[in-house]
Amino acid sequence: MSDLHDDAALAVLERRIDEWLAVFHTNNEVVADIQRGEGDERRWFVRMRGVEKEFTTVWLTLGQRTLRYETYVLPAPEENVAEFYEHLLRRNDRLVGAHFSIGIEDAVFLRGEIAVSALNQQELDRILGSMYAYVEQCFRPALYIGFASRFRD
């Protein structure tokens, strides 16, 4: 089991994440916005402009042991349901540090987490870059499978 971090250690890491995200924003023109969660939440929202999907927003949530990251990908499919989920499950096999899952209202999310002890600026950059790339790679093919009739002429 990973180490449990106390409030003081988490406050230090929280400040570092703020700093890392500021650098990430400065160095990446695809980043549209970065916001913090409300109140005492240790949560960030990183909104990135995409090509295949107009925007991808990655939510980062700092816990006592892990940093959880997730993004909304698509609503539940309207058709070709088995083929849609098979497509995403096969993609899961090639993903590193993230996986597709079903969330609220059967929507598709991409999620992952990393131990707080392994988190540094390079890992945060890798996480955000990977989440962006995975959504860009899967969005259009999944959309065409799960919502095929909307694209027929």
Image (tube, rainbow, N blue to C red):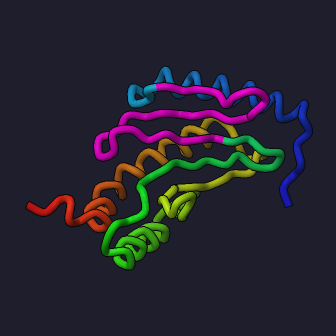
- Give the position of the N terminus as an image quadrant: bottom right
Q: Front-most of 18 and 42?
A: 42
Q: Is 113 in the magenta?
A: no
Counting every numbered tag in the picture gives: 0
Q: Residue at x 36, y 71 (%)?
A: 84
Q: Is residue 61 left or right of residue 102?
A: right
Towards the viewer: 146 or 35: 146
Residue 82 position within the rendered picture, expressed as x and y whole percent measured from the top left: 38, 79
Residue 14 in picture, x, y percent from top left: 75, 30
Q: Quadrant of residue 37?
A: top right
Query: Residue at 83% of width from left, 35% of height from top?
Result: 10
Q: Is residue 90 visible?
A: yes
> Which residues are the magenta region?
33-60
Main secondary structure of the magenta stretch: strand
Residue 39: say if magenta: yes
Q: Say if 26 sits above or below 61 in the image.
A: above
Q: Is residue 123 left or right of residue 63?
A: left
The answer to whether residue 96 is seen in the rendering is no
Query: Looking at the image, is 116 positioned above or below residue 74?
Result: above
Residue 146 vs 54, above or below: the answer is below
Q: Residue drawn 49% across and 50% down?
A: 72
In the rendered image, residue 41, in percent from the top left (x then y), is placed at 75, 33
Would residue 61 appear left or right of 81 to someone viewing this image? right
| Residue in the foreground of this view, choosing between 23 and 51 | 51
Q: Locate residue 81: give its quadrant.
A: bottom left
- Whether residue 53 sits left or right of residue 66 in the image: it is left
